[in-house]
Amino acid sequence: MAFLHLISAGAAKGLVQAVQREFEAGAGVTIDGRFGAVGAMKEELLAGEPCDAVILTQAMLEQLAADGMVVGESIRPVGRVYTGIAIPAGSTRPHIHDAEALKAALLHATAIYLPDPQRATAGIHFANVLAKLGIHDAVAARLRPFPNGANAMRAMADGRDAQAIGCTQVTEILYTSGVELVGVLPKEFELATLYSAATCPRAQNAPAAARLIDLLCGDGTRSLRQVGGFEPV
């Protein structure tokens, strides 16, 4: 069976996995997917890793298209994803409705799980939120960074610390068992990231890549995307 090489932001991992079995059976290919922080995935693409299709932020894909690294005409939106707060399943839900409530919740937490604060969209943003709240130094020892949000949420679920809290893309929260979405960040700290998909000019399996993008971005998976945290655009 042929392979379809996919480089993708971690925010789309759950969506890809949700359609993977059906897609592979219909297309006659196996998805070889690599998922992670957008910065790390961009580095893999630029380093020449095999790539038929790529899912990153819209802004990043537009720049990559200008540089000839993705096919500009193939770019299609998957959906807009908000950054949210999560807790281990069954824990007491903290108030996060405004800056002061969020600050209190974070100061109360025994551990704070987050994606890479240097290369992950949500991780970079959340580090800035901590700085704006004036508590970064106060909680620094309790920060638990991971390469991507999915890993951070999995670790929080496995840790079973009822007083832990996490922040990452809503999609990564909703697709991780053992954690619950409390809500999106307060309005003053809101982050909505548009993720899109595109094919690569060096694709070895361009037809299958286009077929996967049609599936992920088409009307047939619209409800699936919404349930998984992708807001339609």
Image: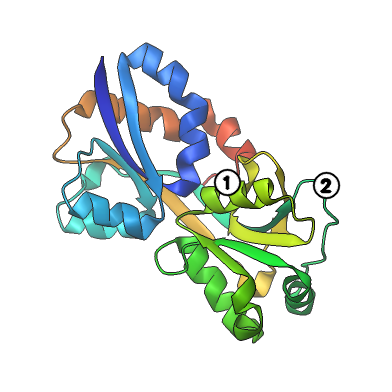
- Residue at 26 percent of width and 24 percent of height: 3
Q: Which residue is located at x 32 percent, y 31 percent?
A: 32
- The image shows residue 153, relative to residue 119, as above or below, that is above
Q: Residues within 10 Å of mark 1 (few under 14, many from 20)?
A: many
Using residue 225 as the reference point, say whether residue 166 is left or right of it.
right
- Coordinates of residue 85 in the picture (x, y in percent): 68, 59
Query: Helix, strand or loop at disc 2?
Result: loop
Q: Position of residue 146 (x, y in %)?
A: 50, 58
- Checking the image for residue 171, the label placed there is 1
Judged left or right of residue 106, residue 39 is: left
**Residue 25 vertical placement versus 176 (above, below):** above
Q: Callout 1, which amino acid?
A: Thr
Q: CA distance from mark 2 to mark 1?
A: 19 Å
Q: Is residue 133 visible?
A: yes
Q: Amino acid at mark 2?
A: Gly
Quickly name the residue at label 2: 90
Nearer to the camera, 188 or 203: 203
Type of colouring: rainbow
How packed mark 2 is, by other alpha carbons closer than 10 Å (few <14, some 14-19, many 20 or more), is few
* Residue 199 x/y as whole percent: 25, 39
